[in-house]
Image (tube, helix red, strand yellow):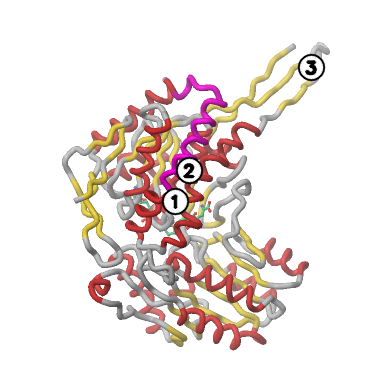
Amino acid sequence: MKEFKNFINGEFVASGKWFDKRSPLNSQMLGRVAEASRADVNAAVEAARTALLGPWSKLTVTERVDLLYAVADEINARFEDFLAAECADTGKPLSLAANVDIPRGAANFKIFADVVKNVPTEFFETATPDGKGAINYGYRTPVGVVGVICPWNLPLLLMTWKVGPALACGNTVVVKPSEETPQTATLLGEVMNKVGIPKGVYNVVHGFGPNSAGEFVTTHPKVNAITFTGETRTGEIIMRAAATGARPVSLEMGGKNAAIVFADCDFDAAIEGTMRSVFVNCGQVCLGTERVYVERPIFDKFVAALKVGAENLKLGLPDDKTTDMGPLISKEHQAKVLSYYQKAEDEGATIVTGGGVPRMSGDLNNGCWIQPTIWTGLPDTASVMKEEVFGPCCHISPFDSEAEVLQRANDNEYGLATAIWTKDVSRAHRVAQKMEVGLAWVNSWFLRDLRTPFGGAKQSGIGREGGVHSLEFYTELKNVCIKL
Ligand code: NAD
Ligand code: 6OD
């Protein structure tokens, strides 16, 4: 039986309590995971603090960024190991993880190494009454030990999206991966040791949220800042924990994203993009579309085309090259998504396709499979129009005017992302600017440039990460004023 241990001060450790990690494909045991005790978390924070003040702080910026480049190169050298671990934990297709999760896991170290190496701070000359003047310059220092709390949907990508900039800025980290996806964060410990990252700079503690590693990390007084990705309700709890000690938080949280498809769009591109934004990763992407608004003249044609696309998706094993979609992450999440499928039906939806659990072969029937699902006919007040499902499903509604669709699309407590499909450039800008979101894509979806600000509006998040914006969270910016 495989064992996934905590990684504390450069050592793989377990203190006695274990929990099971099962495959989402068939619920078979994949291995057991060491649950970090409070003492383990204390040890991880202590190791991080010692490294922060010790060897990590002694490196020059060039030495530090060279090490982060080596981390990225070593992830790429062990590409197949990371790929196998990520697909085993999540059940996602190899083709997806090989193109998105693992390359981005490596790139997240390089981009932030480059930012830290190349981005200057500010400088001002100030006039003084004696005529001699003063100069001011900005000087960045690390915030300290950063607690990194991660979700399960893109485990390596989302964890390194935070660990990359944190380390580049000279911080040390204590990472709490999702209990559903322990493997790639653990494997990264081997990479850190191999390339010579000093002990204690990168620590991993496994476990759950309340009364477990998540709570122990976020309430620890020597964790100086907390960066979190996950559900909005969890983010609220973490924000409350961070209030003790007035510690900064960066929160990347849930969404209920709308796509807006105008009649003048490139129809095939809009269908291709919406297929991805609804169904990729089995709908488990925070940026994913769950509400589709289509201008009335092309509504019927759009619904028919998306139905064909959804019905052609092949559900299957990660290593089958013809697989388009894997299972949901867990039985618990499958039950949650199915409860929304039931609510949609109870609230009067027309089920265009899907709506249940597919028949699989053999022991796959014990897995967390779900049918790609499309609804029409619901009012904007229905549960699946308001609440995040986080599954491979969407509702499609017709609209008649730009003003109407803007009002309806914005009428939601979340504000993460949107995708706007139109050939009218002026309208594209107008609508993108009026959407109450952190990320607006026009004629595309999830097209990423890692130098750009990433984050959510309203209940989808607090703060922006990406490029220079990450420096705002992962450093203290000090002003040094020198009287000449
Ligand atoms: P989750 O909130 O259930 O869990 C996220 C992490 O928080 C896990 O590691 C969990 O163990 C930990 N946790 C739970 N309770 C905690 C507590 N009380 N104290 C400390 N830690 C705690 O989220 P999830 O189910 O893993 O992920 C899915 C959610 O994440 C969706 O809502 C999705 O939209 C969101 N998400 C957002 C983004 C973004 O960039 N905005 C990206 C990916 C996922
Ligand atoms: O691309 C990214 O940097 C990012 N944070 C993606 C988030 C996807 C959510 O599931």
Q: Say whether residue 186 is magenta.
A: no
On residue 162, which mark appears? Answer: 2
Amino acid at the residue labelled 3: Thr
Query: Residue at the spot x=39%, y=74% of the render?
Result: 315
Residue 117 visible in rendering: yes
Q: Say whether residue 65 is magenta.
A: yes
Amino acid at the residue labelled 1: Thr
Measured from the top left, where is residue 299 in percent x and y?
61, 85
Using a 10 Å C-alpha cutoff, classify the residue at mark 2 as few (fewer than 14 neighbours), some (14 to 19) or many (20 or more): many
Measured from the top left, where is residue 467 in percent x and y?
60, 43
The CB of the residue at mark 1 lies under 8 Å from ligand 1:
yes
Mark 1 and mark 2: Cα distance apart in space: 9 Å
Query: Residue at the spot x=74%, y=11% of the render?
Result: 484
Magenta range is: 56-79
Tell me which numbered mark, 1 or 2, is placed earlier along the sequence.
Answer: 2
| Numbered circles on residues, count | 3
Amino acid at the residue labelled 2: Lys
Looking at the rendered image, the disc whose residue lies closer to the viewer, 1 or 2, is 2
Residue nearest the viewer, comparing 72 with 264: 72
Measured from the top left, where is residue 378 in percent x and y?
49, 83
Tell me which numbered mark, 3 or 1, is placed earlier along the sequence.
Answer: 3
From what the image shows, is residue 47 above or below residue 153?
above
Q: Mark 3 points at which residue?
A: 128
From what the image shows, is residue 295 above or below residue 179?
below
Q: Is residue 30 left or right of residue 279?
A: left
Residue 244 visible in rendering: no
Measured from the top left, where is residue 416 in percent x and y?
54, 59
Indicate the quadrant where residue 383 lies: bottom left
On residue 290, which mark appears? Answer: none
Q: What element carries label 2?
A: helix
The CB of the residue at mark 2 lies under 8 Å from ligand 2:
no
